[in-house]
Amino acid sequence: MCHSPGSHKHDALKTNVKTVKFPWSVREEVRVTGYLWSEDRMVGGADLAGFIGNQTACYERFSEWFGKQNGQFSAIVEQNGEIWLGCSHTWSYPLFYLQKGDVLAVTDDPEHLLPAIDKPVADRETRNYFLNFGVTPAGYTIVPDLMQVRPGETVLLKGGSSQHTLSPIHTFSGTRNGTSEELARLIREEFGKYAGFLKDKEILLPLTRGYDSRLLACLLKEFGLTKVTCATWGRPANRESPTARRVAETLGFPHIFIPYSTDSFHRDAKEEMFDDYIGYAGHYSSMPFLQDYFAIRHLLREGVIHAGTAVLPGHPGDFIRGAHLFPSLPGKDDISLANAIISAFGNSYPATHRERDLLRKTITREFPEKNTAKTALQKFDLWDYEERQCKLIGNSSLVYDFFKISHLSPLFDKNIMGRFLQLPFGQRLGCSLYYETLTTQFFSPHGLDFDLRPAYTKPAGRPAVIETLIKLVPRFLKKIYYPLDDDVFYREFTGELMRSSQKLHYRHPLKPHFYNCYLTQWYLAKVESRLKNNPGADFHD
């Protein structure tokens, strides 16, 4: 049933909307950024605002319509003292809000809301979660009272209350077997939409030796897109670059390798722009990704890419192919599922028993989602999708927005993602059907079936005794066992950032090559220092 907002109920309510971070189009009561697909046509800007304006008779209609759309976009609707918010399933343009007294405030840059918060200090539970996963749980941020719209969520804000609707990620009912031929046909059909938009664009393809970016390279070739530059970056002589170069050369695309070094890091990290990026990409809820920043900065400086370039990152390929699933997953109860999530996705932060108990409590409270995820597999998928793929991996695409470069994520297309999540567990486990599809239907026809990583089935999580042994082994022995020279150059980046904040006492990760453990501590310390001072910007401006 459709309930129209009653203007008489909210006469004393003050609404404040401030959008400064992304390019927004405004049409009457609607603000929108990004695009959606309508009958294979990309709709954005004022046209998209008009589309949404036709769905604003009531919040129920807006929410139902919004949850069915396919694209990368966010929207804000102001209606008679109410504010309606929506982030599409990709969470490409995060939104934040604050409800305080008679004021509703919304922004795409949470910095503008800090002055309205009396004591912006992270609570123990959110802090603990962030230190273990590099993101804040569900709709929370590091700052109390400052909330974020979740991926695929619509929110109705009105005086003193809110209503939340989370769209299911399992968009097709039941399970249905797939074949490599059918899935290849689906991928090509859906990519055709993106090819139409890209036909006159210069394209940057971040290319590794993996499956996902190699698939995108094949699709670019098949659709006759020739203005393509492939690029790989990281440690000189890393394991990714030779294969990536061979893939690019086989398809006739130019390939660039950007070697990372301590000197280049020092040069770029000393710029004020780097600090701006940390705030831009972290937004008080996600660990900022560093591995792409220096490469994009270099490519812009050298004129290889520019504001008109479109970038095609390969995420969330690991999610749709089933890379994180393990054989015993379907039989897990909520507690053992939480333990599996900590083991699979935690950054090796050495949590105490009390901190680990608190972590389990947070996961089991925030991610039952009985309306959208009923089985253990669906709950695991939901956590992986929302907390890892959107807030951590997908959030890395903000580096392109920061430099005013457009980006598209074809593998995040709702139709592709929904079909792969519909496959039976056995066809997803070990990425079996995904790998078969890509190898037989794409790589072999293009002569790219070389240097492929073998299929891998993730173990079910370590028994408690093994976790305990890892904690007890001296750190110097772990450093001998675990590979420390990562392909990305994270070891050196992390060391330099840690030396820049020497007063911080870091907890060392249980596995010494889990550098994100240090980066989350570094970013959290930076945020807490910022919150302690908190001069902020006036959100009433």
Image: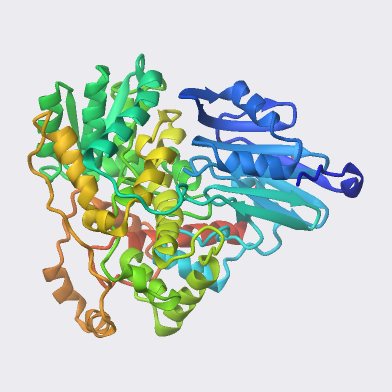
Q: Is residue 118 in view from this perspective?
A: yes
**Placement of 269 over or under 36, stated as above or below:** below
Figure quadrant of residue 49: top right
Q: Is residue 460 left or right of residue 382?
A: left
Q: Is residue 394 left or right of residue 223?
A: right
How many circles with numbers are drawn on the protein?
0
Figure quadrant of residue 246: top left
Q: Is residue 506 in view from this perspective?
A: no
**Placement of 221 over or under 176, stated as above or below:** above
Q: Nearer the viewer, residue 388 or 181?
A: 181
> Where residue 261 sits in the image (x, y, percent)?
21, 43
**Placement of 94 over or under 360, stated as above or below:** above
Q: Nearer the viewer, residue 205 or 4?
A: 4
> Where residue 20 sits in the image (x, y, percent)?
61, 35
> Where residue 335 sits in the image (x, y, percent)?
43, 77
Identify the residue at image location x=42%, y=28%: 405
Q: Is residue 203 left or right of residue 381?
A: left
Identify the residue at image location x=83%, y=53%: 102
Q: Nearer the viewer, residue 360 or 121?
A: 360
Identify the residue at image location x=62%, y=55%: 147
Identify the residue at image location x=11%, y=70%: 480
> Where residue 373 sits in the image (x, y, percent)?
49, 61
